[in-house]
Structure formats: C-alpha cells, structure tokens
C-alpha cells in the first residue's frame, strides 16, 4: 500500500522548468523589443497656440513686454521688476476684466519672466497669457 501512495505522489508533481523558460524568453523578448523614448525639454517660448489665445491677446488691456536685454515694458513704458506689481494692480483697477499679455523675447532670461509672472500673480490677476508666435 505504501508503494501505491508513493507512486501517486510522484505522478502529482509538475515540472515547472519549461514554463519558467518560456516566461524568461518572453521577458527577454519584451525587453529587447521595447523602445525607450527620451522626452525632450519644453520649449518655453514656442508653446502651441490656438486661436482663442490669439484673440485674447488682441483684446488685451495690458501688454507686458520683456526685451532681449531683460528690460520690462508695460504699455510701452520701461519699469523695474519691483514696480511691475503696483503698476499692474493700478491698471487692473481701471479695467478689472482686462487680460494681461506677457510677451518675452526669445533671448530674454527666464528668471525675469518668472519674476514678472510672480508679481502679476501676487496682485491677484487671473487672466494672464503669454504671447507666442503663430505656429
């Protein structure tokens, strides 16, 4: 009777080696055939523009321009970066539903753009867009 139970125990085992071989072969296949895409950085000064942003830029009540020398112009008058907040606040008081368009030059420093945008955000302006080239 013992030999009969031992024979059943031997028959009940399953050899998993071929299954593991197949799994490893499939794993190697997927690793070898996978494509790795390197994501490129974001081009800050050339984002995609749709027509609604261009229409808003045409209706802008405040234009903030930053030239290549990092000089800030609001409504064609030069201002220091510290004066941006109070000037924008005054202009928004005159036209609270107006849009603010920031137009940086491609050669301007991104830190100046960030300071201008931060100053505009601190005064509570919600309608702010960045001007871009059509494309």
Image (cartoon, grey):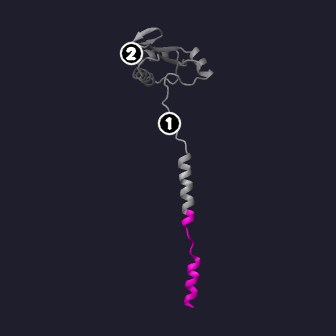
From the image, tell me which residue sits under label 1.
38
65 in relation to 25, above or below = above
From the image, tell me which residue sits under label 2.
83
Instruction: Name the quarter where the C terminus is drawn.
Output: top right
Front-most of residues 62 and 30 = 30
- Tell me where the magenta segment starts and ends, as one range: 1-19
Query: What residue lies at 56% left-to-right and 80% top-to-bottom?
Result: 9
Q: Secondary structure at mark 2?
A: helix
Query: What residue lies at 53% left-to-right and 15% top-to-bottom?
Result: 95
Extreme-bottom residue of the structure = 1
| Image spot of residue 78 (x, y percent) | 41, 9
| Image spot of residue 88 (x, y percent) | 45, 17
Q: Where on the picture, by quarter, is residue 71?
A: top left
Q: Where on the picture, by quarter, is residue 5?
A: bottom right
Chief SS of the magenta region? helix
Query: What residue lies at 45% left-to-right and 25% top-to-bottom?
Result: 121
| Image spot of residue 127 (x, y percent) | 53, 23
70 in relation to 41, above or below = above
Q: State which mark lies toward you, 1 or 2.
A: 1
Query: What residue lies at 48% left-to-right and 25% top-to-bottom?
Result: 44
Q: Let me know if residue 19 appears in the view.
A: yes
Say whether residue 115 is left or right of residue 59.
left
Q: Is residue 7 magenta?
A: yes
Q: Is residue 12 magenta?
A: yes
Mark 1 or mark 2, which has the lower sequence index?
1
Front-most of residues 111 and 87 = 111
Instruction: Name the quarter where the N terminus is drawn.
Output: bottom right
Q: Secondary structure at mark 1?
A: loop
Q: Let me know if residue 94 appears in the view.
A: no
């Amino acid at each position: 009777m013992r030999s009969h139970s031992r024979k059943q125990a031997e028959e009940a085992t399953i050899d998993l080696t071929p299954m593991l071989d197949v799994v490893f072969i499939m794993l190697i296949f997927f690793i070898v055939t996978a494509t790795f895409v390197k994501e490129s950085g974001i081009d800050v000064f050339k984002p995609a523009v749709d027509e609604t942003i261009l229409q808003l830029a045409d209706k802008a009540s405040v234009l903030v321009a930053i030239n290549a020398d990092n000089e800030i112009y609001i409504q064609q008058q030069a201002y220091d970066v510290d004066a941006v907040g109070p000037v924008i606040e005054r202009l928004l008081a005159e036209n609270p539903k107006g849009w603010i368009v920031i137009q940086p030059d491609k050669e301007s420093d991104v830190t100046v753009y960030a300071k201008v945008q931060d100053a505009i955000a601190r005064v509570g302006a919600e309608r702010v867009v960045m001007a871009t080239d059509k494309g």
